Image (spheres, helix red, strand yellow):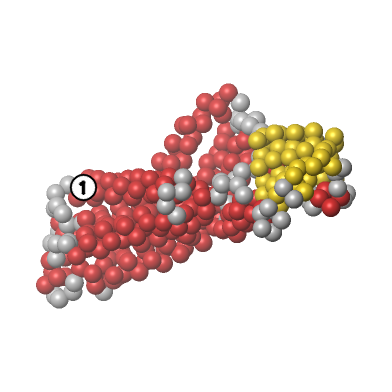
Amino acid sequence: MTLVKYLYRRFMPVFVGAVAFFSLVLVLVDLLMNLWKYIQNQVPATQVFMLMLYYVPKTIWYAVPLGILFASSFTLSNFYAGNELTAVFASGVSLFKFTLPLLVFSFVMSFVLFIFEDNLVVNTYAKKTELQSQMLKEKKSLNNDRIVVLAEGGNVIYKADLYEDAQKRLYNVYFIFRDEHQNLQAVIHADSAKWDTAQNIWKLQNAMQYTNRIGTIVLETVSAEYTERLVEPAETFRNNTISVEEVTVKVAKEYVEHLMRTGLPYNESLSLYYKKFAFPFVVFIVVFLSIGLSGRTAKNVMLTSLAFSISAAVLFYVTQMVTMLLAKFGYISAFSGAWFPVILFTVISVGLLRGART
């Protein structure tokens, strides 16, 4: 039996078992958090079971980094404790060469995790969320208030106190028009504006137009020159904020572009979009961590491996939480918020690997 086969034979059962364990814990935590709500709404046990099934792919997605970190750390620590690695090193095989199959496996798993999340996790989690909302009678309102939307690259600005989706109507609305140099051309105020689905245009009620005439604001009759440009769809004004983490990459990209186009805050959504690409590589990083952390002690291998795994994972997620918050408020770029923890822990992992006992 080659070293590669032997390594995988020892590693894979622990990996599968760890992923199953962490996934089960997450499912049970979600169940316990919502159990009282299910009881209050008399939700049938079969529907609760369906919710748990829909949630399983999401929990596996969360559990894979933890599982592979624990499995690699536990397997290598066992090798150290049994003096098996001593024989490997004595035969001239370095720690890096011996663990290279784990690194290759984790690298492949990074891409698998990305595809798994984009094609299965997003869909099943959306079904879980929708079914749970129905069972708990939770309905999201599409009405919106204090709206500011930029159209035509910022040349037309919509500002309204309220959008009522049932009537597709804006209340106390201002339309600000600017030229290509961002100079003010006119401002139209209307008590309300109703979306005309037949003509795809906003129809104004009790409207007044203030036009900029060479630095002087003049009250004039509302001009079709401006009203014909009020074609931003009513759906833009809905309270339809989505979580980028809960949609596919394609939908997330379209949503971020929509936020940018309409002038809405987009830093948080853009950083979450980048995170969708960065997060799967955590699987690759944690194997580096486990290799560097393994062999630190030959006593209480399981407990030590579990402690190291949880500590490393917590440190990574805390770092990621901090950088994502910094990106949200614009202190760092959205790209840095998503990728900085990955780069930082890659450097730390390489340092641990170089200092590992061989």
Seen from the viewer's position, the closer of residues 254 and 16 is: 254
Residue 224 placement, left or right of 59: right
Q: Quadrant of residue 42?
A: top right
- Residue that badge 1 annotates: 304
Q: For the residue marked with disc 1, what is the amino acid? A: Thr
- Mark 1 element type: helix
Q: Residue furthest bottom?
A: 92
Decide: is 174 above or below 261. Answer: above
Front residue of 318/217: it is 217
Q: In this view, does 185 lie to the left or right of 325?
A: right
Taking the spot 25% from the left edge, 45% from the top edge, the residue there is 307
Q: Neighbour class for label 1 at 10 Å: few (<14), some, many (≥20)? A: many
Question: Closest to the observer: 192 or 24?
Answer: 192
In what quadrant of the picture does the N terminus appear? Answer: bottom left
301 relative position to 191: left or right: left
State whether residue 281 appears in this view.
yes
From the top left corner, tell me how far across and down residue 143 is, in percent.
70, 35
The location of residue 109, given as percent across then percent down, is 42, 63
Q: Quadrant of residue 350?
A: bottom left
> Residue, x 65% and y 30% (percent of image)?
137
Task: Pick the quarter of the image with the C terminus.
Answer: bottom left
